[in-house]
C-alpha cells in the first residue's frame, strides 16, 4: 500500500538551531510532494510543494525541502528555527495517477526561546 | 474569496445521533475531499469528489456518507455517530496556484461523540 513515513514524531529545539524533518514515501512512480504546517489551533497551510524540475524547493518562512528520488525522500529543512515555528508539520504525497493526497502522521516541533 | 468554509466549528453528539458537517468553497474547484485528523495518525482521507455528481471512497469511509450536488458544496454525513468518530474533520478543495495543483483546507470541525 502507498504510504508516507515521518520518522520524527516529536522534535524539540532551541531557537536558532537547524531543523531537518524526514519524510519518505513508498510509491515508486511519479509523485507530487508537499509539506503542510498546522499551527496550534489552526488549519493546515501549505509550506512548499514539488512537482518537477529543481529538486531543491524553497517555501515560505525560510523553509526548504529536497527531493531525492533514489531515496524516496522529501526532507524539510530550515537553517535557523524560531519560537514561532512551533507547530505540527505534515508531509503529503499525491501519486501522479491518482486524485488522492496521502499524509504522513506528522511531526510535532517545539521550539524553546 | 472566502476560500473553504466549514460549519459548525464544534459539535457534541450522543452515540447514535446523526448530523451533517457542511463544507463550501467559492473557488470553483472541481476536486473536494474530507479528512479526519487524530493524534498520532495524521490526516486520513474519508471521501473525495472529482466533480458534481461524482464521489469516491478514501482510506476510512465507513460510517460516513457524502454527496456532491453542486460544485460549491460537499457535505459529510454521519448516519449514526459512534465514539470512534470523535475527531477533527477537515474539508479541502484543490485547484491551481502558481500553475500547480494545490489543496486548500478549511478551518476544521471538532466533533465529540459521547
Image (tube, coloured by chain):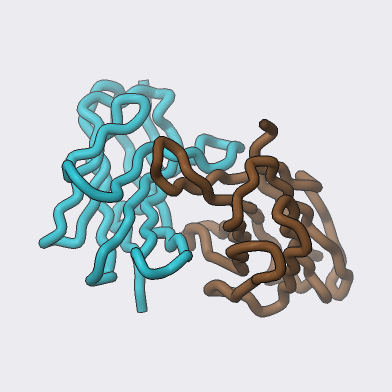
The residue nearer to you, when weighing A86 against A31, is A31
Q: Is residue B41 above or below residue A16?
A: below
Left or right of A68: which side holds B49?
right
Image point (73%, 64%), residue name = B68
How many numbered marks have been drawn onto this rendered protein structure? 0
* Left-right relation of B24 to A31: right
Q: Does residue A73 appear left or right of residue A101 in this picture?
A: left
Position of residue B18 measured from the top left corner of the image (x, y, whole percent) = 87, 69
Q: Residue at x 47, y 43 (%)?
A: B96
Q: Residue at x 75, y 54 (%)?
A: B73
Residue A37 position in % (x across, y down) = 44, 40
Q: Is residue B57 above or below residue B50?
A: below
Residue A49 lies, in percent from the top left, at 34, 44
What is the quadrant of the C terminus of chain A in the image?
Answer: top left
In the figure, the brown chain has which letter?
B
Residue appearing at x 40%, y 36% in the figure? B98
Q: Quadrant of the N terminus of chain A?
A: bottom left
The residue lying toward the viewer, choosing from A37 and A70, is A70
Residue B36 found in image quarter: bottom right
- Image location (x, y in percent) of residue A71: 14, 61
State which quadrant residue A60 falls in: top left
Query: Is residue B103 or residue B111 the one in the foreground?
Result: B103
Q: Which chain is cyan?
A: A
Amino acid at each position: 500500500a502507498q504510504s508516507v513515513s515521518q520518522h520524527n514524531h516529536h522534535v524539540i529545539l532551541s531557537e536558532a538551531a537547524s531543523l531537518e524533518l524526514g519524510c519518505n514515501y513508498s510509491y515508486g512512480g511519479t509523485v507530487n510532494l508537499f509539506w503542510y504546517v498546522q499551527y496550534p489551533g489552526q488549519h493546515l497551510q501549505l509550506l512548499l510543494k514539488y512537482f518537477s524540475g529543481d529538486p531543491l524547493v524553497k517555501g515560505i518562512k525560510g523553509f526548504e525541502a529536497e527531493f531525492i528520488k533514489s531515496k524516496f525522500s522529501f526532507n524539510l529543512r530550515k537553517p535557523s528555527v524560531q519560537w514561532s515555528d512551533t507547530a505540527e508539520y505534515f508531509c503529503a504525497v499525491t501519486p501522479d495517477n491518482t486524485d488522492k493526497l496521502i499524509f504522513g502522521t506528522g511531526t510535532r516541533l517545539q521550539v524553546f526561546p | 474569496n472566502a476560500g473553504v468554509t466549514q460549519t459548525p466549528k464544534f459539535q457534541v453528539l450522543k452515540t447514535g445521533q446523526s448530523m451533517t458537517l457542511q463544507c463550501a468553497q467559492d473557488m470553483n474547484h472541481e476536486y473536494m475531499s474530507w479528512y479526519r485528523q487524530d493524534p498520532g495518525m495524521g490526516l486520513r482521507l474519508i471521501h473525495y469528489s472529482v466533480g458534481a455528481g461524482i464521489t469516491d471512497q478514501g482510506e476510512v469511509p465507513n460510517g460516513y456518507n457524502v454527496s456532491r450536488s453542486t460544485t460549491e458544496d460537499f457535505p459529510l454525513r454521519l448516519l449514526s455517530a459512534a465514539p470512534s468518530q470523535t475527531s477533527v474533520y477537515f474539508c479541502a478543495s484543490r485547484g491551481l496556484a502558481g500553475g500547480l495543483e494545490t489543496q486548500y483546507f478549511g478551518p476544521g470541525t471538532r466533533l465529540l461523540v459521547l
